[in-house]
Image (cartoon, grey):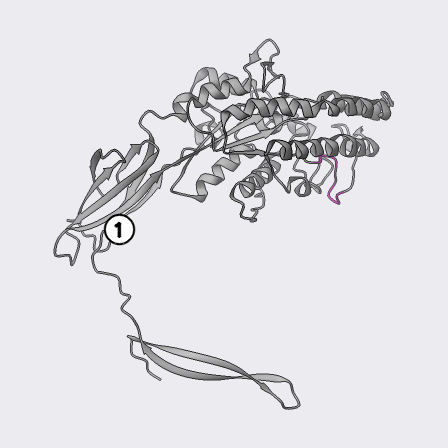
């Protein structure tokens, strides 16, 4: 049957049961024709498209990962945020076509631009954008389009310890001269190195992914997280650098205020608690127990329990310090279980020579007597202080601990090869940090959709 181009065929199907010996169904179709409405595009039309310029981009000169400026000038750009206008989707463009733009702010001030895809800097706010296109093919006169543009920057900041700073993942790996996140400000570049800050970390990757999700929003990322930080020494007060104890890093809360100025924090991410209860000392004692039997596991657990009992008061102090910053969202991450093998069972941690550093029994102690109670304390603090606990991380890491054949945890040999010291050991590697980023993104967007970590990253 031939159907005219301006008509459409409507098939109405009805399923009818067959009562014969073989239970089946047959379909009865009823066909009708109705005229189509005219949906053809006009031969000429001005069309406005726009996007915010990316603020987090890989830097080929510094490891191929995004930089970490951490400066007030970066967070508060004097001219505003770059908006890219685009008229290339207009219908009827020909060589003689000209485009004129008028951008009007809430105060009535206007500025004019010309060209098919100009850019301009605007402070945050709502603007009316008008595009006038002349000499479009088939047009009898200028074609005009108008739209509303909301210039919005999402400010994401990270505070916390080595799990937030990106410890174990330098921007440029080297056993003698690793490079950490680059800042064009020499003092901040030095501070990033002293704090072992990297943008190969969950919060930075989360910010990077978020800006890809919405072209109509810019995203700015700041991290003042320090490797080795506790709540008291690092976040609320200064702390000695993990690189050089004679160098003191400023209190993260104070430094964050100085960097962001009056800008509003949309998302504050934090990873804290492990150093507050002495994880470094715990690891040393567990390794000693595996090698010599001293101190006893009972003595280790008693020390951990005493420190965990003091943690709620520390979280209350942290909440009091965060509150004046007024973040819209506070996302907190638990500590993944580093003790599991590829089957999700407790596994022995081997040293570079193949000798056990942490026995299976001591791995169980770390998991059940330290990490699990710590994460429970973090969950209680999240409910008490109205923070958002990021779910799913613990389950994701269950088969990717240090003893796994596919670990998401940086091993001792890898840490020595990548940064020339053992500091990166037991921290999430790039795949682990990508999983944390995906969980942060999912918690922020509330989509329930989780992209899996990509293979091939170191």
Foreground residue among 260 and 115: 260
Magenta-drawn segment = 337-344
Q: Quadrant of the N terminus?
A: bottom left
Residue 326: percent from left, percent from top: 49, 28
Residue 51: percent from left, percent from top: 35, 42
Residue in the image at 58% along x and 18% along y = 236
Q: Is residue 222 left or right of residue 49?
A: right
Residue in the image at 56% along x and 41% along y = 443
What residue sits right under mark 1 in the picture?
A: 47
Residue 262 in sight:
yes
Residue 52: percent from left, percent from top: 36, 38
Residue in the image at 47% along x and 40% along y = 210
Asked if residue 119 is among those painted magenta in the image, a careful observer would answer no
Residue 185: percent from left, percent from top: 43, 18
Foreground residue among 79 and 306: 306
Foreground residue among 216 and 281: 216
Q: Which residue is most to the left?
A: 140
Q: Quadrant of the C terminus?
A: top right
Residue 181 in sight:
no
Q: Which residue is most to the top?
A: 246
In this rendering, the answer to whether 378 lies above or below 187 is below
Which quadrant of the view contains residue 76?
A: top left
Query: Within 10 angstroms of label 1, few (less than 14), some, or many (20 or more) residues?
Result: some
Which quadrant of the view contains residue 163?
A: top right
Foreground residue among 325 and 298: 325
Number of numbered tags placed on the structure image? 1
């Amino acid at each position: 049957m031939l159907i005219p181009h301006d008509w459409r065929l409507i098939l109405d199907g009805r399923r009818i049961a067959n009562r014969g010996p073989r239970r089946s169904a047959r379909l009865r179709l009823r066909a009708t024709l109705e005229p189509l409405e005219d949906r053809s595009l006009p031969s000429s039309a001005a069309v406005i498209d726009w996007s915010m310029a990316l603020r987090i981009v890989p830097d080929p000169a510094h490891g191929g990962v995004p930089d970490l400026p951490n400066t007030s000038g970066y967070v508060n750009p004097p001219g505003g945020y770059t908006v890219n206008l685009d008229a290339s989707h207009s219908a009827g463009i020909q060589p003689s076509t000209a485009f004129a733009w008028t951008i009007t702010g809430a105060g009535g001030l206007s500025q004019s631009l010309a060209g098919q895809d100009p850019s301009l800097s605007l402070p945050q706010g709502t603007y009316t954008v008008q595009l006038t296109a002349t000499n479009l093919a088939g047009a009898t006169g200028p074609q005009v389009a108008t739209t509303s543009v909301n210039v919005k920057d999402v400010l994401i900041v990270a505070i916390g310890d080595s799990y937030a700073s990106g410890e174990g993942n330098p921007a440029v790996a080297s056993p003698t001269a690793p490079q950490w996140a680059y800042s064009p400000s020499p003092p901040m570049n030095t501070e990033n190195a002293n704090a072992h800050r990297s943008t190969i970390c969950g919060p930075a990757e989360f910010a990077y992914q978020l800006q890809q999700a919405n072209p109509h929003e810019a995203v700015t990322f700041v991290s003042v997280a320090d490797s080795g930080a506790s709540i008291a020494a690092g976040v609320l007060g200064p702390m000695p650098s993990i690189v050089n104890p004679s160098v003191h890093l400023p209190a993260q809360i104070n430094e964050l205020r100085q960097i962001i100025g009056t800008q509003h924090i949309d998302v504050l991410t934090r990873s804290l608690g492990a150093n507050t209860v002495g994880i470094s000392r715990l690891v040393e004692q567990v390794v000693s127990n595996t090698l010599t039997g001293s101190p006893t596991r009972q003595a280790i657990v008693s020390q951990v329990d005493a420190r965990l009992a003091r943690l709620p008061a520390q979280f209350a102090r942290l909440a009091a310090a965060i509150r004046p910053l007024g973040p819209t969202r506070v996302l907190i991450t638990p500590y993944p279980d580093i003790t599991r093998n590829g089957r999700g069972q407790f596994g022995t941690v081997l040293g570079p020579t193949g000798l056990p550093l942490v026995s299976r029994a001591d791995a169980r102690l770390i998991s059940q007597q330290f990490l699990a109670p710590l994460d429970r304390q973090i969950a209680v603090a999240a409910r008490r202080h109205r923070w958002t606990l990021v779910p799913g991380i613990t389950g994701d890491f269950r088969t990717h601990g240090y003893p796994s054949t596919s670990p998401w945890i940086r091993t001792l040999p890898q840490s020595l090869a990548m940064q020339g010291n053992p500091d990166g050991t037991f921290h999430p590697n790039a795949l682990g940090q990508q999983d944390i980023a995906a969980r942060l993104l999912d918690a922020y967007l509330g989509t329930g959709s989780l992209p899996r970590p990509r293979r091939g990253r170191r």
